[in-house]
Structures are given as structure tokens and as C-alpha cells.
Image (cartoon, rainbow, N blue to C red):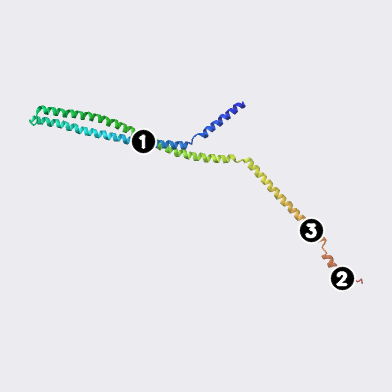
């Protein structure tokens, strides 16, 4: 049975050691927020780049649209000139055909540009959605960090208070107070004893002084001498 207890204690100690070695959750949270802000910055850069590509594709689309219309108008103008005998009919057909071929090329480029613009817009929407998600996560994590810091402060204060309370030995404190009261009582009794001794010594000295006092004897002697001088001590 004892060996199981020992194994349990060893496992408990290792677990506590592993917990103690874990990184500070506040530092981990702060690092996570920094990482997300870096991701947010990269997303903004990617969004700007994709938007630039979308703008270029849209400009290309508009430019090719203008070219297509221009080639179409040129073909019409050439055919009208041929109709008015201002240009050879065969040459007019050849040039008008070339204009229409150029128009077709422009149309194809317009179609490709439209597809690119659509793809870029889809990417833009996704990036904007990701940015909003990252912003929301950053906001949530920052709020969690504030709460975590507050909880850490409270837990540390509570831990320190409980530790101080745990270190107070009520029994030893009471025992110390009892010993102090006993010491004070002893000192008071000793002081009283010394007072009694002092008073007793003083009384004996007074009795001795009184017994050895020759004041009355001297007065009696002086009285006898005075009577003798007055002849009062003589018997009648």
C-alpha cells in the first residue's frame, strides 16, 4: 500500500512541475494577438494588391470595349465609303474584314477581362471577410486578455492572502499570549513581594529607632535636675 502512495506522490509532484513549467497564459495570449495583427496586416496588403489587379482588369475591359466599338465603327465607315465609290469595293471588304477581326480580338479580351474582374472581386470579398473575422478575433482576444489579467490579479491577491492566513498558527499564538500573561503576572507578583519586603524592612527600622530613642530619658533627667535646683525633690 505504501508503494502506491509513493508512486502517487511522485506522479503528483511531476504533474505540478509540468504545470509550473507551462508558459504564462497571458504571454501566450499577447503573442497570439500579435500574430493575428500580423495576419491582419498581411491580409490588408493582399487585399490592396488584389484590388489593384481588379482595377487593372476593369480598365483593360473598358479599353478593349472602346477598341471593339472603334473597329466596329471603322468597318461601317469603310463599307459606306465603298458604297459611295470613294474606295475600291474589294479593298473595302478586305479592310472591313480586318477591322471586324480586330473587333473580335477586342471582344475576346473583354470576355477574359470580365472573367478576371469577377475572380478578383470574389477574392476581394473573401479577403474582406477574412479581415472582418480577424478583427473580430482580435477584439475578442483583447477582451479575454483584459479578463484574464484581472483574474490573475485577483487570484494572486487571494493566494497571497490565503498563504498568509495559512502561515498564521492560531494555537502557537494563543500559547504565546498565555505565556506572556503568565510572565506579566509573575512580574507583578514579584514587584508586590519586593514592595512587601521594603515595607517590612522600613517598619523594623522604625521600631529600632524608636527603641533606641534617648529623647524622653534626657527630658526626664533634665526635669529631675530642675526639681533638684528648686528643692522640690527633697522630702518634706
Q: Name the spot of residue 96 as percent of width and height, x first.
A: 14, 29
The image quadrant of residue 236 is: bottom right
Between residues 178 and 19, which one lies in front from this camera angle?
19
Q: Secondary structure beneath disc 1?
A: helix
Q: Secondary structure beneath disc 3?
A: helix
Q: How many neighbours does mark 3 have within 10 angstroms: few (below 14), some (14-19), or many (20 or more)?
A: few
Residue at horizontal 74 percent and vertical 52 percent from the top: 194
Along the polypeptide, which appears first: circle 2 or circle 3? Answer: 3
Between residues 30 and 91, which one lies in front from this camera angle?
91
| Horizontal side, residue 71 vs residue 7: left or right | left
Q: Secondary structure beneath disc 2?
A: helix
Are the two marked residues, 1 and 2, in contact with CB atoms closer than 8 angstroms?
Answer: no
Mark pair 3, 1: CA separation: 107 Å
Q: Name the spot of residue 23 as percent of width and height, x first.
A: 49, 35
| Horizontal side, residue 207 vs residue 153: left or right | right
**Label total for image:** 3
What residue is shown with label 1? 42
Mark pair 2, 3: CA separation: 32 Å
Please name which of the two marks, 2 or 3, marks the residue nearer to the observer: 3
Quadrant including the N terminus = top right
Mark pair 1, 2: CA separation: 136 Å
Q: Name the spot of residue 6 as percent of width and height, x first.
A: 60, 28
Which label was assigned to residue 205?
3
Q: Residue farthest to the bottom? A: 230
Are the two marked residues, 2 and 3, in contact with CB atoms closer than 8 angstroms?
Answer: no
Q: Name the spot of residue 125 as percent of width and height, x first.
A: 32, 33
What residue is shown with label 2? 225
The image quadrant of residue 127 is: top left
The image quadrant of residue 208 is: bottom right
| Horizontal side, residue 131 vs residue 57: left or right | right
Please name which of the two marks, 3 or 1, marks the residue nearer to the observer: 1
Amino acid at each position: 500500500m505504501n508503494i502506491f502512495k509513493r508512486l502517487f506522490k511522485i506522479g503528483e509532484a511531476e504533474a505540478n512541475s509540468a504545470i509550473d513549467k507551462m508558459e504564462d497564459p497571458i504571454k501566450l495570449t499577447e503573442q497570439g494577438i500579435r500574430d493575428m495583427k500580423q495576419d491582419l496586416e498581411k491580409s490588408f496588403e493582399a487585399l490592396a494588391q488584389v484590388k489593384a489587379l481588379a482595377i487593372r482588369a476593369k480598365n483593360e475591359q473598358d479599353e478593349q470595349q472602346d477598341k471593339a466599338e472603334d473597329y466596329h465603327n471603322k468597318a461601317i465607315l469603310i463599307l459606306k465609303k465603298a458604297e459611295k465609290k470613294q474606295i475600291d469595293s474589294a479593298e473595302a471588304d478586305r479592310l472591313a474584314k480586318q477591322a471586324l477581326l480586330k473587333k473580335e480580338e477586342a471582344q475576346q479580351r473583354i470576355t477574359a477581362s470580365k472573367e478576371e474582374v469577377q475572380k478578383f472581386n470574389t477574392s476581394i470579398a473573401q479577403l474582406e471577410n477574412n479581415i472582418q473575422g480577424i478583427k473580430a478575433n482580435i477584439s475578442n482576444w483583447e477582451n479575454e486578455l483584459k479578463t484574464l489579467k484581472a483574474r490573475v490579479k485577483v487570484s494572486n491577491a487571494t493566494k497571497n492572502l490565503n498563504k498568509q492566513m495559512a502561515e498564521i498558527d492560531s494555537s502557537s499564538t494563543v500559547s504565546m499570549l498565555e505565556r506572556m500573561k503568565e510572565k506579566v503576572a509573575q512580574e507583578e507578583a514579584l514587584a508586590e513581594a519586593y514592595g512587601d519586603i521594603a515595607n517590612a524592612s522600613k517598619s523594623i527600622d522604625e521600631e529600632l529607632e524608636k527603641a533606641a530613642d534617648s529623647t524622653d530619658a534626657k527630658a526626664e533627667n533634665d526635669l529631675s535636675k530642675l526639681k533638684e535646683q528648686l528643692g522640690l525633690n527633697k522630702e518634706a
